[in-house]
Image: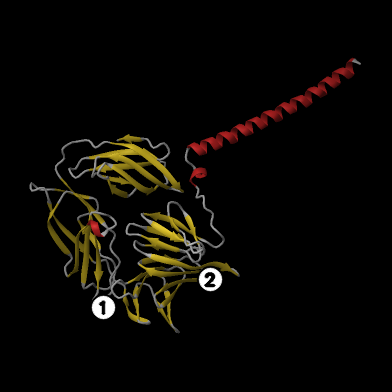
Amino acid sequence: MENKYRKFYVDWWKIKKSTVYGVVAIVVFVAVVTGGIWWLWNNDSILTNQPTEAGPKDSGKLIYFEGEVRVIRASTRETVLVTKEIFVSAGDTVQTQADGRAKIQMIDGSVISVRPNSTVVIRNSNSLFGGKNVRVALDGGQINVQTQDQTDGENVVEVRESENYVNPETDASFNINEKTNGGEIRISRGSVETKIGDQTTVIKENEFASVSNGKIANRESLVNPPKLVSPGSGEQLLAGSNGSAGVNFRWERSGGIAPSSYNVQIAKSPFFMSDSMILVRDSINSQSISLGSIAPGTYYWRVRASTNSGQVSDWSDPGKFTVIRRSSGNVITAGDWSVEPLGGSIYLVSGKTKPGSTVRVAGREIYASGDGTFTIQISSNSSIVGIEISDDRGNRTRFNLSLTTARATKL
């Protein structure tokens, strides 16, 4: 009896021990999962930054935007102000304002870059029998299309009277000429088959063509945007005793067909909006101009080239320079920091500083308003961004801002 009792006791203890181990394992698993979710949530991870709007089948995706961008839904005619990555479907219209830019990734892997003051309509976006068909129509402004190795399907851009079949491995620009109201096509890589009526023309790499009155009106070698020489990007110029600075602007050709003249714009905004312009000059026959009196501040300038045939290049990448007064040694303060995640890697940063100061964050900048407040939309894959705030007297202060806690540290 004693042996039987001991055997029963040992068996009972083994069952109890395994049960305890199982319970402990479950508790540890739940704790790990709960802790992981808590950490992800408090570190502003993918759980909190993913777009909340799921796209329908065969929809493209607006993967990047800055400034004011709107999408008009074909199904509801609702106008959506873009504040996060969203889908675009057949029939939808994408509109950018003067400060707006957007990139749309289509179902065939191509990327459509929409320039400021542009309107593009998604005509078609479907995958059928293994082929992927993409068709867009440019109603105004300019778009750039970059295609990958799309062996099946079609990628078509409608520009006025023409249908342009974009071949694989192509980088092409399409725009509406504001003066002639005709279409223009620029090919920097690859080729495009342009169809007008029953006639098809192949436009090749480094070629330009204009479409007017139902035909190819002009076709020639591409004229490239000029290369800016001086003032150099980010250069600071010290104002003289009269409180202003004389500036000599110089540029040079960057290959392609020889230009006959140049257009120059200088503005106080990187978007070159009309109310920010301080100089607009056309038909310059030289590669330089001089301005004798520019007040302290931050400025942007760009140049484009024209040919005798009427072809106009894209604008050069903007140059930036600053005219500063002699530093007074004052420190610029800032506070009331706020960070709002908009989805993905896009954030809305706001704060308050000295009125009229220039605030630079993640490659973008804005001027503080009359009460010192500012709000700027940025894109960053890092949890910390650098911020520089400067005034027209040369004073400058730098901060590191946490995009998760909205805490700023002065450097």
| Residue at numbered disc 2 | 153
- 205 or 71: nearer the viewer: 71
- 54 is higher (above) or lower (below) than 174: above
Please indicate, yes or no, whether residue 372 appears anywhere in the rendered image. Answer: yes
Label 1 or label 2, whichever comes before in sequence order: 2
Please indicate, yes or no, whether residue 173 appears anywhere in the rendered image. Answer: no
x%, y% of residue 76?
Answer: 50, 61
Q: Which residue lies furthest to the left in this view?
A: 241
Please indicate whether residue 210 sits to the left or right of residue 163 in the image: left
| Residue at numbered disc 1 | 309
Amino acid beneath label 1: Ser
Tell me the residue at 78%/25% (across/down). Answer: 14
Amino acid beneath label 2: Gly
Tell me the residue at 59%/36% (across/down). Answer: 33
Q: In which quarter of the image is the C terminus?
A: top left
Residue 281, quarter of the rendered image: bottom left
- 389 or 94: nearer the viewer: 94
Label 1, label 2: how many angstroms apart (C-alpha)? 35 Å
x%, y% of residue 409?
Answer: 33, 34
Please indicate whether residue 314 sits to the left or right of residue 167 in the image: left
